[in-house]
Image: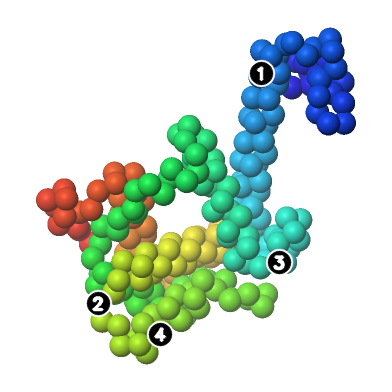
Amino acid sequence: MRDRHPRLTTLDSNGRPVPDIAGQHAELDEALMLTRLAELEVKRLQLSLIKAARRAHMTTKQRGRPLGLGSRQGILDRERALERELDAASKYVPVHALDDQPVPVELGPAAVRDIAEDLVAHWNELLTDDGEGEDSWMADLTLKLRDLKRLGVVDLTGTDVAAIVGLVRLVVEEIDDQSAATGQPGAATSGAQAVLERARCLNHQHARSRRDGMHPEASGQAPKIP
C-alpha cells in the first residue's frame, strides 16, 4: 500500500489526509482495500504457523507464548476464529453469516457414540498427545462419554452429538499431528487402525454435510459406515 500510495504516509496523527490528497477518494479506497488484503494475508500466515507448530510437536506453552495465549483451548479458539474469518472472506460474507444454517451430522447419534467409545477403548493403542504435562483431546472425549453415562443419557441430543463429533475430529487431528512429528504410525494394532478409519469416516461425512447443507434423511439415502 505504501509503495503504491506514497503520499498516504503523510496522514496526520488522527488519520486525516493532508490537503494535497484530501479529494482523492479513489486512492484512499484502494489503499484501504490493500490494508484489508494485507490483514487477511497475515491471518493466513498465522493460521499456517499455528498448524505447523502443532505438527512440529511444540508444547502448549511454546505455541501460545508468541500469541499471548496460555492454554490449549485458547490456541484452538484462535485457530478456529482464523479459519472462520478466512472462510467468510473467501465467500464474501460476514462471519456471522456462516452460522445462518445448522450444521447437520450424517451419522445417527448411536453410530457417533459407538465410534467415540471405540476410540476411547483403544486409547493405549493410538498415538495421542498426553506428554509434556498436556492432556490429550482423548481425555476430554473420555470425560464427555463418562458424563453421559453417569447421567444415564441414552438418547443423545443434537448438542451432545455435535460435541462428540468435534472431539473426535480433534482426536484424529492430534493423532495425525503426533504421527507426522514422530514418524510413528497413528495406530499400533489392526483393531486400533480400523477404529481410526471409522473416526476419519465420521470426519469426512461431517465435512461433506457442512458443504451440502443436507441431512441424510433429506437425501433419501441411508448413511454408510464401514
Q: Quadrant for residue 181, please give it.
A: bottom right
Give the vertical position of 88 relative to 200 (above or below).
above
- Neighbour tally class for label 1: few under 14, some 14-19, many 20 plus, Cα within 10 Å: some
Would you name the residue on which mark 3 appears? 70
At label 3, counting other C-alpha atoms closer than 10 Å, the crowd grade (few under 14, some 14-19, many 20 or more) is some
Up-down relation of residue 174 to residue 130 (above or below): above
Mark in front: 3 vs 1 = 1
Could you tell which of marks 1 and 4 lies nearer the N-terminus? 1
Q: Which residue is mark 4?
A: 146
**Residue at left 66%, top 19%?**
29
Q: Amino acid at mark 3?
A: Gly
Q: CA distance from mark 3 to mark 1?
A: 38 Å
Say which label, 3 or 4, has the lower sequence index. 3
* Quadrant position of the C terminus in the picture: bottom left
Residue 107 in percent (x, y) is at 25, 62
Secondary structure, mark 4, is helix
Whether residue 109 is situated above or below residue 11 in the rendered picture: below
Identified by mark 2, the residue type is Asp
| Rendered image: mark on residue 30 | 1
Q: Is residue 100 left or right of residue 140?
A: left
Mark 3 or 2, nearer chain start: 3
Q: Residue at x 48, y 63 (%)?
A: 170
Image quadrant holding the N terminus, namely top right
